[in-house]
Amino acid sequence: MKVSVVRKKAGQVKADLRIIAVALAGETSGAVAELTDNERAAVERRAKKTGFKAKPGSKMLVQTETGDIILVGIGKKKDTEAYRRAASRAAAAAAATHAKSAAFCLGSAAGAAKFVEPVIEGFRLNAYTYDKYKSKRAGDDAPKVEAFIVAGSGLPAGAAATKIVSRMGAIIDAVFLARDLINETSSVKTPNYLVKTAKGIAKGTGLSCQVWQGARLEKERMNGIIAVSAGSMEPGAFIKMVYKPGRKARGVVAVVGKGITFDSGGLSLKPAKSMEWMKQDMSGAAAVLGVMKAVAALKPNVEVRGYIAAAENMPGERAQKPGDVITYRNGKTAEVLNTDAEGRLVLADALCVASEDKPDCIVDLATLTGACMVALGIRIAGVLGNNQKLINDLIKNGEATGERLWQLPLPDDYKADIKSGIADMQNIGSGWGGTITAALFLEAFVGDTKWAHLDIAGPAFAEKPLPYMPRGGTGFGIRALLSYIESL
Ligand code: BES
Ligand code: MN
Ligand code: ZN
């Protein structure tokens, strides 16, 4: 889809479908006033006839001789997320009307420029489909939107417009890469498949990529990855990628991803229903790959290091057993009472290495606990960590990108809940506050590095379509992290 930003009024834009967001509070949108007289009359007539109200989620399609026009309601809150969602609905309408070109008309009001990026995100992210396994690919015969235009008289032009378009292109590409990986089946996307993907990204961009597999994992005492992989035919892997800016870096950010390519639970086997979507258990790793791919294109003045702990959690005959003890690279020991709490076991390895490399901060992303979904639902991730400034910054950038994070506490005294009888820690607590005990386990491996943990078990995967998140992997976390990195 070719995206462009143009300084034009709604009445001057040529597109199969023109989109105008209208807010509640009695006001008509500026962009409606910018339609041609005939078009505006048609829109107003129809709005009157149908009693159109600009509530969030509402829309009204008007066919005119000069092309289709859709009004999308955004309610009272004219924030960026309202525009993202409006554009997402417009993308669905564009698909339904088989539009080949669509234009989001922002009008000439001051401040319209801040909606350009959200509108591109909402439209393009909603237009994603994963049809690799459809015999007849979805909508094969229907025309797709080939050109998406954002129009408004006060919008950036020239080089500034080009920059926005290419920046958004890099971000969307990264999200789509992550979605494709999450949606891929587990029998295809083994840990080694993640390795190949990482190497492919490195090759295409010039990032460095280091991989530990087999004997190297043992030599490096990556014993969490080894223990979790033991029950699988698929060997585990550890991946490290680095982006270095051309100039002196303003900082060094490490991002760490959980890459469980399938989580059966291991010997602590999950019930069938809970296993249905466990191909998504590498969403943290997918986000790291997406971030690395994007920073190679965006070239922020920050060094970014990506770390992935990849393994398949299976109950094969060599599987680790409840009661086994893992000795980590930093000397700490953990008793594995439940093999289904495997994410923290592999992340511990990666967090050790990431903190040994002494970055300014570590952010890990993991589909870690069902408890986080119980607490926050499917659209908000949990954030926990040892540094309030880092957490605040992540929350702020999450807010700006529509990727909501909510902080949960990390109280020291809860460590009693994961105290083991025979090792330093055990990998499960009593059952209460499961997101917190999981994070406390991770904390033992970051030393004194500033660290935040994003539990993305809820928002990583959409079982049903959501605004600008079609069913399947969402790529959650990438946009908030990129926004954070660019803010440094
Ligand atoms: N991958 C799961 C968590 C998960 C659940 C992610 C649902 C996405 C959707 C994780 O490895 C897991 O199994 N966690 C257990 C931990 C428990 C055994 C302490 C859980 O949440 O039940
Ligand atoms: Mn598990
Ligand atoms: Zn898991």
Image (cartoon, rainbow, N blue to C red):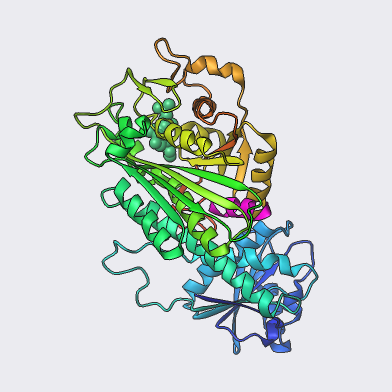
Quarter assignment of residue 312: top left
Q: Quadrant of residue 44?
A: bottom right
| Nearer-the-camera pick, 30 or 457 | 457
Q: Is residue 479 magenta?
A: yes
| Above or below 194: residue 68 | below
Figure quadrant of residue 346: top left
Viewer-side residue, 322 vs 66: 322
Residue 53: in sight, yes or no?
Answer: no
Residue 15 in the image: x percent, y percent?
A: 58, 83
- Give coordinates of residue 281: x percent, y percent: 39, 42
Give, as a single range, the part of the protein colored magenta: 478-488
At which x and y percent is residue 135?
26, 66
| Residue visible at 61% across and 42% down in the picture | 405
What is the number of callouts on the image? 0
From the viewer's perspective, is 149 left or right of 331?
right
Q: Ligand 2 lies in which image quarter?
A: top left
